[in-house]
């Protein structure tokens, strides 16, 4: 995830234009953040000795809660932050994509 973020930030964004540039610059980092949150959640559960059984509803609640916090609370204390409701969708889609990738990986193992 970190490598994708760096690739996006340093290579893809500077070399694109138009709609693709907007999507990469505004939403792709949020998409990656959602996927990273699911990975961190799974790692924390495993580290605590709990079975890692990630389900759609609890993961969705985490992703939407974090997304809403970042979009509506963060601008209150961080002046350079702006609220964009589409970022919440990007976070959720990234997290759900990672969840389904993890499920697919478990089935193949």
Image (tube, rainbow, N blue to C red):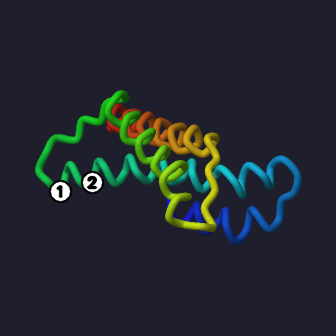
* Residue 99 placement, left or right of 30: left
Instruction: Say which of 101 and 49 sits in front.
Output: 49
Residue sitting at the far top: 57
Residue sitting at the far right: 18
Residue sitting at the far front: 76
Q: Secondary structure at mark 2?
A: helix
* Residue 17 placement, left or right of 81: right
Percent x, y of residue 50: 13, 45
Percent x, y of residue 55: 31, 30
Q: Secondary structure at mark 1?
A: helix
* Residue 32 placement, left or right of 69: right
The residue drawn where x is 87% and y is 57% is 17
- Asked if the residue at tag 1 contacts the one at tag 2, i.e. Cβ–Cβ closer than 8 Å, the answer is yes
The residue drawn where x is 48% and y is 44% is 68
The dot on residue 3 is: none
The residue drawn where x is 16% and y is 41% is 51
Percent x, y of residue 22: 78, 52
Instruction: Say which of 102 and 77 sits in front.
Output: 77
- Quadrant in the rendering for residue 8: bottom right
Residue sitting at the far left: 49
The dot on residue 43 is: 2
Question: Would you place residue 95 above or below residue 82 in this image?
Answer: above
The residue drawn where x is 37% and y is 41% is 62
Q: CA distance from mark 2 to mark 1?
A: 6 Å
Q: How many numbered tags mark residues here?
A: 2
The dot on residue 47 is: 1
- Quadrant in the rendering for residue 24: bottom right
Q: Quadrant of the C terminus?
A: top left
């Amino acid at each position: 995830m970190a490598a994708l973020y760096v690739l996006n930030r340093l290579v893809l964004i500077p070399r694109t234009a138009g709609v693709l540039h907007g999507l990469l610059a505004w939403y792709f980092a949020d998409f990656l953040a959602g996927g990273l949150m699911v990975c961190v959640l799974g790692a924390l559960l495993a580290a605590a000795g709990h079975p890692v059984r990630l389900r759609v509803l609890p993961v969705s609640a985490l992703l939407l809660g974090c997304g809403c916090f970042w979009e509506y609370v963060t601008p209150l204390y961080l002046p350079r932050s702006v609220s964009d409701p589409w970022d919440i969708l990007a976070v959720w889609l990234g997290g759900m994509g990672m969840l389904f990738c993890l499920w697919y990986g478990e089935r193949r193992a």
